[in-house]
Image (cartoon, rainbow, N blue to C red):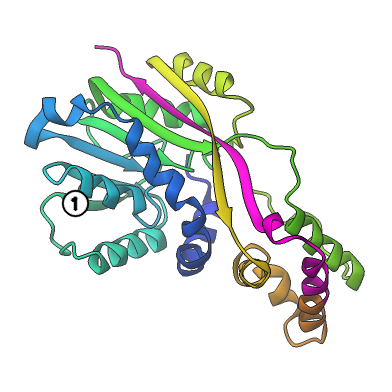
């Protein structure tokens, strides 16, 4: 089922997501397509059909269309704000609004408006941690795949390693003595996978076979200024909005800059584990 609070957040923050968060995911998302068996597109030819589940701003769908220009690609997302962003990204990349092989559909990962056994390849990046029922989403991906079709997905692995700039920012908040509200995130979500083996087992449990789960590392480089901008405009935007109109907003930024200055430049390179999974529907 669609998690309404998550969808509302992505509707509201679509432009900021595209500016501040999509670049963080970009390289790992595009790299997922390298794991798709090269024979898949050649076997299907011009009837090759792809569904990008949780397409977001369309990065993966558009990359797939570049790689396989004869394919027909459907980007599915429950957020109309993100679908609008995907359409804008497609237009900026030179793909016509009425491109015959590209369409955007509003739909939930666990209930997609796509017929049974009609897709050769399902792709999905950084989505399976957000769904409320991951098994239901995986069963739905299994349903729309043709027998022998492939699912390729990438998402987060749990990591207990702190990111020094994030810790420094939190300490700046404490330095300022701001009484923060309790955890505002009441979103019901499946969460990150705990291990690549555990991820593979979840795919097998819903009927996938030839499952290959591989741990990888997502790497993204900020600097002190760009990280503060990211925190201010996206990750902690709610906090700065709370402080808007008070001296605390600029004071927090000043304290954060001071703590960032104590960190070495390479501390702003985020390296975190992710898992990519490739599996087939039997047949």
Q: Position of residue 199 (x, y in %)?
A: 54, 23
**Residue 254 appears in view:** yes
Q: Tell me which segment is drawn in magenta.
A: 255-283
Name the residue rendered at 69%, 76% in the picture.
Answer: 241
Q: Position of residue 198 (x, y in %)?
A: 58, 20
Q: Is residue 208 above or below residue 86?
A: above
- In the rendered structure, the answer to whether residue 210 lies left or right of residue 46 reads right
- In the rendered structure, the answer to whether residue 130 lies left or right of residue 64 reads right
Q: Residue 84 occupies which quadrant of the picture? A: bottom left
Name the residue rendered at 78%, 63% in the picture.
Answer: 169
Name the residue rendered at 52%, 39% in the picture.
Answer: 131
Residue 112 is covered by the magenta coloring: no
Q: Is residue 7 above or below residue 195?
A: below
Name the residue rendered at 76%, 77% in the picture.
Answer: 253
- In the rendered structure, the answer to whether residue 115 lies left or right of residue 13 reads left
Residue 267 is covered by the magenta coloring: yes
Q: Is residue 232 above or below residue 50?
A: below
Q: Residue 94 occupies which quadrant of the picture? A: bottom left
Residue under numbered circle 1: 102
Q: Nearer the viewer, residue 114 or 19?
A: 19
Q: Secondary structure at mark 1?
A: strand
Q: Nearer the viewer, residue 7 or 39?
A: 39
């Amino acid at each position: 089922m669609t998690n309404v609070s998550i969808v509302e957040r992505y509707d509201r923050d679509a432009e900021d997501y595209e500016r501040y968060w999509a670049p963080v995911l970009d390289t790992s998302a595009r790299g997922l397509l390298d794991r798709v068996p090269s024979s898949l597109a050649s076997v299907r030819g011009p009837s090759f059909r792809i569904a990008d589940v949780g397409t977001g701003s369309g990065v993966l769908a558009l990359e797939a269309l570049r790689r396989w220009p004869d394919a027909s690609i459907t980007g599915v997302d429950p957020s109309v704000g993100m679908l609008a962003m995907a359409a804008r990204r497609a237009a900026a990349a030179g793909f016509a609004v009425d491109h015959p092989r590209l369409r955007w559909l509003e739909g939930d990962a666990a209930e997609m408006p796509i017929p049974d056994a009609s897709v050769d390849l399902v792709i999905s990046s950084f989505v399976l941690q957000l769904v409320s029922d991951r098994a239901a989403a995986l069963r739905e991906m299994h349903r729309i795949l043709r027998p022998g079709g492939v699912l390729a997905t990438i998402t987060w692995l749990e990591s207990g390693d702190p990111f020094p700039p994030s810790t420094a920012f939190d300490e700046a908040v404490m330095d300022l003595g701001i009484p923060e509200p309790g955890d505002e995130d009441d979103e019901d979500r499946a969460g990150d996978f705990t291990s690549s083996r555990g991820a593979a087992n979840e795919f097998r449990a819903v009927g996938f076979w030839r499952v290959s789960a591989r741990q990888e590392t997502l790497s993204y480089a900020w600097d002190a200024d760009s990280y503060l901008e990211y925190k201010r405009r996206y990750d902690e935007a709610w906090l700065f909005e709370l402080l808007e109109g008070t001296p605390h907003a600029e004071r927090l930024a000043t304290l954060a800059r001071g703590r960032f200055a104590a960190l070495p430049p390479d501390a702003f390179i985020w390296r975190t584990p992710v898992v990519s999974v490739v599996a087939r529907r039997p047949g």
